[in-house]
Image: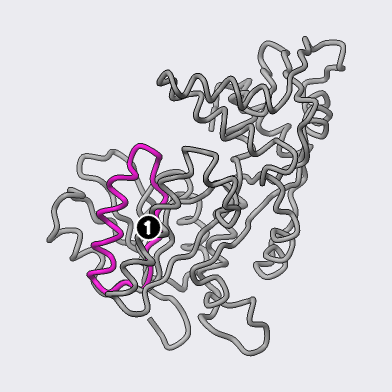
Amino acid sequence: MSDNKLEKIVIAGGNVGSSTLSHLLATDTFEITVLSREGSTTTFPSHASLTVKRGSYTDAAFISSVFTGQDAVLFAMNFMAMADQTKLIEAAAEAGVKWIFPTEYAGDGKNDAMMSAVPMFQPKVAARKQIEELSEKYEGLKWVGIATNPWLEFSLQRGLFGFDIKNRKATIYTDSAPFNSTTLTQAGLGIARLLSLPITTSSNPRASLSHYANNFVYISSCLISQTSLFASLQKATSTTKDDWQIEESTIEESIATNREKIAKGDMRAGAMLTYAYYLGEGKGGNYEKKAKEDREVLGLEEGKLDEIVKSAVQKLENGKVF
């Protein structure tokens, strides 16, 4: 690490990591190491600044060798791999890494009510707490949370916003409200620009990594609603409202129903409960004010919803699902 900039970065994880990797390589200013699980068939681009290390996450010597000498670790692990992340965070701290970007890519982690209400957010809260506790032993250790809210294309294609595109069915929540959502491309670009910030700066303190130390950066493509999504969907599918089978419900009904299902062990209900909090009015899904400020810092443009929806629909029709 130079006096005021990250230089050596480890990336551990899936789709978000892949999107971020391409944008980081495009800057041509980082030495990047990708940590890949032994036996993984994932391929990576050939680049002079990129090293791929494959091995067992339980091999302490291997993991230590990957993390030693690194400035930062960016985690992008799936929900089922969070136990692995816990061990890797400790290993990174022991190896002297000072900046850890734990797996977030979800809601506003500073919204305590939202975090406590949604079970899927609990491992994320625990990871931040773990890093803060480790910082008492490893001086200078910090976390940075990356809020993205739900993935726009992924969620749209899978009906998680209430729209079954293939069958032209819509569930409209009468008490829903605008919420932020992000594409993988926007997230990757935003993260790359975040990592490129100086650690400190006197000209604009917000435009520094130090501003985000033990804090969140808010990335968003669009502030959307079911109404705006439905309008864009009708354009993308050349349909009208009359072509859709519409059912009305409420966010509160969704929350109650999915809590009951969770109690019975239904894992999908956990995801549906999470989306109810994204879409529900006053439940934490709208962080547009913060996203606008960070958009300016990172030089990000607001997404064009019609274009994003059209692309997602075309890919779905062609069998390409995010």
At x 72%, y 19%, the residue is: 171
Please name the residue shown 73% across and 13% down the image: 168
Colour basis: one colour
* Labels in figure, total: 1
Residue 309's spot in the image, x, y percent?
A: 72, 33
Quadrant holding the N terminus: bottom left
Q: Is residue 75 magenta?
A: yes
Q: Is 288 contained in the magenta span?
A: no
Q: Nearer the viewer, residue 106 or 201?
A: 106
Give how far across and how far down residue 77 sits, in percent.
38, 46
Q: Is residue 224 above or below residue 156?
A: below
Q: Tag 1, which secondary structure?
A: strand
Is 62 positioned to the left or the right of 140 in the image? left
Which residue is at a point 42% across and 57% down the rendered structure image?
Answer: 102
At 27% from the left edge and 47% from the top edge, which residue is drawn? Answer: 84
Q: Is residue 68 above or below residue 1?
A: above
Q: Nearer the viewer, residue 224 or 307?
A: 224
Q: Position of residue 152 (x, y in %)?
A: 64, 38
Residue 267 image point, x, y percent:
43, 24
Q: Label 1: few (<14), some or many (≥20) within 10 Å?
A: many
Residue toward you, 31 or 143? 143
Q: Looking at the picture, which amino acid does disc 1 mark?
A: Ile
Q: Is residue 71 left or right of residue 56?
A: right
> Which residue is disc 1 drawn over?
11
Left or right: 27 with respect to 131?
right
Start and end of the magenta stretch? 70-97
Answer above or below: position of 162 versus 167. Answer: below
Q: Is 212 situated above or below 252?
A: below
